[in-house]
Amino acid sequence: MILFSKMPRYLQFIVSTLAIMLTIMLLFRVAFIVVYEPVNTHWYELFDAMLLGFRYDARMACIIGLLLLLLANIKPLHPLDAKLGAKIIHVLLWLVSITMVLFYVIDFANYAYLGQRVTASLLNYADDAAISTSMVWQTYPVVSLLVGMLILVWLIRRCIVTGK
């Protein structure tokens, strides 16, 4: 904890933001396991899958952290010293939060409907967007999902902004 308090303020912000994001991603993965209890699967197999997922999430968080670090090296865009930088970082973190929640909601819904995780084959449905949109509207509670997603994004951003 002493090491963290001796870091520059912006590095503290990046580290805490990435820790919050990794925690939220881990909670999404745990929620997936709890909701869709895999049958005939031992805990050590789940541990390996969770470790693989954590490595992927850590990679995504590091890319975001690198982007935040690069922004800090451009003086007019420094998020803690310049108003433009603060606006840019807030927009960037909103986009990251929305993308993260959207991905996990699509993953949950896809698994509930097809019994498989999201893969690139899901992009095949984009060929005929009208039919796909109609199918989604008829199959899923779209309005409830959107309201839930907005609440989740708001909670994630609140956690990141307050650091709690």
Image: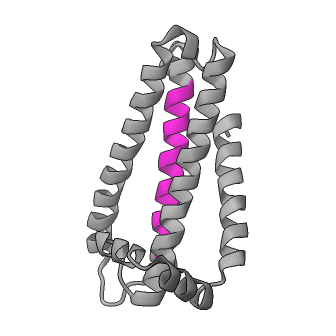
Measuring 39% from the left and 29% from the top, which residue is drawn there? 66
Residue 90 position by quadrant: top right
Residue lying at 70% horizontally and 52% vertically, measured from the top left: 155
Horizontal relation, residue 23 to residue 144: left or right: left
Q: Horizontal placement of 21 versus 127: left or right?
A: right
* x and y, in percent, of residue 34 in the image: 50, 77
Residue toward you, 148 or 5: 148
Q: Residue furthest top?
A: 75
Magenta stretch containing residue 132, yes or no?
no
Q: Nearer the viewer, residue 67 or 161?
A: 67
Q: Position of residue 78 (x, y in %)?
A: 56, 15
Residue 1 visible, this angle: no
Q: Up-down: is 140 above or below 62?
A: below
The part of the image, by quadrant, that contains residue 73 is top left
- Compared to 112, does 26 lie above or below? above
Q: Magenta segment, which residues? A: 13-32
Provide residue 49's location: percent of width, then percent of height: 29, 66
